[in-house]
Amino acid sequence: KQWYQRRVRGQLLLCLLVTTLNADLLITRLNSNKGPAPCARICAGTTGKGSTAWQGYGAPYYYVYTRVDMSECGFLGTPIITALVDGNSAHWQTTTSGVSTAEATKDSFTVYLFGWVGIHSKPGQSGPTASVAQSGQWNVNWQAIGYVC
């Protein structure tokens, strides 16, 4: 049985190695300087459920925002960023037009969430608050593609 497990593990590692070596990442357009193909990197992360530092902004705009740190990725310029919001409650009410990312740099970006939360909310008169975001464990899942050399 042990020889079979070792053989399966070896085959899985070989398959992973071949897949990694045959992977192809092509960045056709970037807002910063392009680098050589071997220097392209996909980096992903999350701000974490229950640990995202949401800040609120009240009248007249009503939104919440958080700064996302991606400095561990090691990008040389501003990467292409895709983000989505996850949570346990009410987060879907703020994302009907998608997640707004702004102020992107090679190390971080900000996510803004607009909308209204709750059946009695009125557009333009109320919206998400930091306490609603934190109690609903809203967090940002993201991926970024850029160059590291």
Image (cartoon, rainbow, N blue to C red):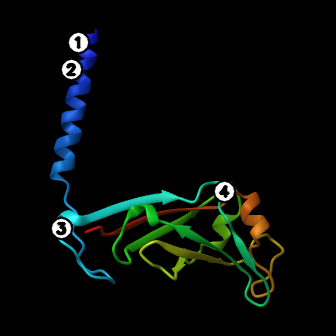
Label 3 and label 4: CA atoms lie apart by: 35 Å
Q: Earlier in the sequence, mark 1 or mark 3?
A: 1
Q: Measuring 45% from the left and 66% from the top, which residue is drawn there?
A: 71
**Residue beneath label 3, please?**
37
Label 1 and label 3: CA atoms lie apart by: 40 Å
Can residue 43 be seen in the rendering of this structure? yes
Q: Tell me where residue 149 appears, x and y as whole percent.
A: 25, 69
Q: Is residue 92 left or right of residue 133?
A: left
Q: Earlier in the sequence, mark 3 or mark 4?
A: 3
Q: Is residue 79 left or right of residue 102?
A: left
Residue 3: which numbered mark, if any?
Answer: 1
**Residue beneath label 2, please?**
7
The reply to whether dot 1 and dot 3 touch (C-beta < 8 Å) is: no
User: Mark 3 belongs to which amino acid?
Assistant: Ala
Dot 2: few (<14), some (14–19), or many (≥20) neighbours within 10 Å?
few
User: Mark 2 belongs to which amino acid?
Assistant: Arg
Q: Which image quarter holds the N terminus?
A: top left
User: Mark 4 belongs to which amino acid?
Assistant: Ser
- Give the structural element (helix, strand or loop) at label 3: helix
**Residue beneath label 4, please?**
51
- Can you say whether 51 is above or below 31 in the image? above
In front of the other: label 1 or label 4?
Answer: 4
Q: Measuring 68% from the left and 54% from the top, which residue is drawn there?
A: 50
In front of the other: label 1 or label 3?
Answer: 3
Picture quadrant where residue 37 is located: bottom left
Residue that sits furthest to the bottom in the current view = 60
Q: Tell me where residue 43 appears, x and y as whole percent.
A: 38, 60
Label 4 and label 2: CA atoms lie apart by: 41 Å
Q: Earlier in the sequence, mark 3 or mark 2?
A: 2
Picture quadrant where residue 80 is located: bottom left
In front of the other: label 4 or label 2?
Answer: 4
